[in-house]
Image: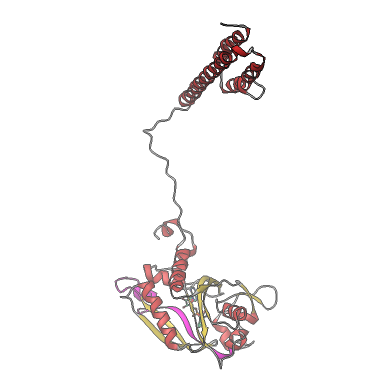
Amino acid sequence: MPDAATDALKTLETEGLAELRACADEAALRAWNTKYFGDKGLMKAAFGKIGGVPKDQRAAYGQEANRVKLALESAHQIKLAEEKEKKLQASLTANPLDVTLPGRFRPRGRLHPATQILRQISGIFADMGFQVYRTREVETDAMNFEALNMPAHHPARDMWDTFFTTTPGVLLRTHTSPGQIHVMRETHPKPIRVILPGMCYRNEAISTRSEIQFHQVEGLAIGAGITMADLKGTITAFARRMFGPERQVRIRSSYFPFTEPSIEVDIDWPKEDPNRDRLTKGTGWLEIMGAGMVHPHVLRAGGYDPAEVTGFAFGMGPQRMLMLRHAVDDIRLFWQNDLRFLRQF
Ligand code: FA5
């Protein structure tokens, strides 16, 4: 038998549905939901009245309240879905999308060849157990020359035309070799196997093979019983991986104040390249590195005792190696940032 309480539920349902129909957008639907189903909402209030309903009518009231609740909830869901669909359709007609248009071209970046080769060099030496170590580009005279067995007025200093800063005794490093001293002093007394990649600066005439700014990768191995055979083996293994087994490696004796004995390493320029003679001054070879057994004075400057350990060091030029690998006929191309050149790598 319907009574006042269940009548109120019916009214709640009718009004709720009418108000729902009147909601024009999602914000109105949210407000409706709070009004009917919020913490202080009408539906909660209706359930709260159950205590005041006479006992024999309570079950019927409860059932009716649940029915009204479900009816309102599902009507709200349907209306909400309709509103969302309406909004989507409106945005589609407002910004029509022509799926037949070609896509927009996005230029893809890539690594500079100088970075690519530095990573390859690091990878090859990492496989041989070398760690990468970084040191500073602005150096002191003491590190760039003196600790490397070139005291002031040593004639060998002329091998490197130097950029000096306005601070006396401070210069742009002419090679990565001062890094050897930093590593030795920091690592002493442990054995060392590191490479040190970085930028070097020389105040020299720019040519097809020489820049005033270029990368070098220094290598240093210190330990008991290291010999020239280890140096030759390491360099040959590196050159095979970098240039392939068919390219030839030539090792010549040379002079550096910080190594004794000293060598230089050349790679044969690709025979089929018409620029071969010009770039190799008619020899067919291009020098890629200087190397040698670390001089006892340098070991001492680094805090090691030459009676206990020996070591080898090398300093290679990645830009020269890029020239050799790709028959690039001018080293200046690497820093000119001409995209037509860089895109070929
Ligand atoms: C040195 O700089 C020595 N520090 C190398 C060394 C290290 C010897 C450890 C012994 C032990 P050199 O000046 O020859 O040596 O340079 C080494 C390499 O750097 C060269 O073989 C070349 O590949 C590269 N290089 C030198 N000068 C230039 C330049 N101006 N432009 C581009 N690459 C260069």
| Residue 166, picture quadrant | bottom right
The answer, for residue 99, to whether it is visible in the render is yes
Magenta span: 269-297
**Up-down relation of residue 52 to residue 329 (above or below):** above
The type of colouring in the image is: secondary structure
Residue that appears at 35% across and 71% down: 275
User: Which of the image's four quarters has the C terminus?
Assistant: bottom left
The answer, for residue 208, to whether it is visible in the render is no
Q: Is residue 134 left or right of residue 113?
A: right
- Taking depth in this image into account, of 302 and 215 the one nearest to the observer is 302
Residue 135 is inside the magenta segment: no
Residue occupying the far left of the picture: 272
- Residue 178 appears at what percent x and percent y? 58, 79
Residue that appears at 48% across and 87% down: 226
Residue that appears at 45% across and 86% down: 263
- Taking depth in this image into account, of 245 and 40 the one nearest to the observer is 40
- Residue 316 appears at what percent x and percent y? 47, 76
**Up-down relation of residue 39 to residue 210 (above or below):** above
- Residue 2 appears at what percent x and percent y? 57, 6
Residue 290 is inside the magenta segment: yes
- Taking depth in this image into account, of 138 and 180 the one nearest to the observer is 180
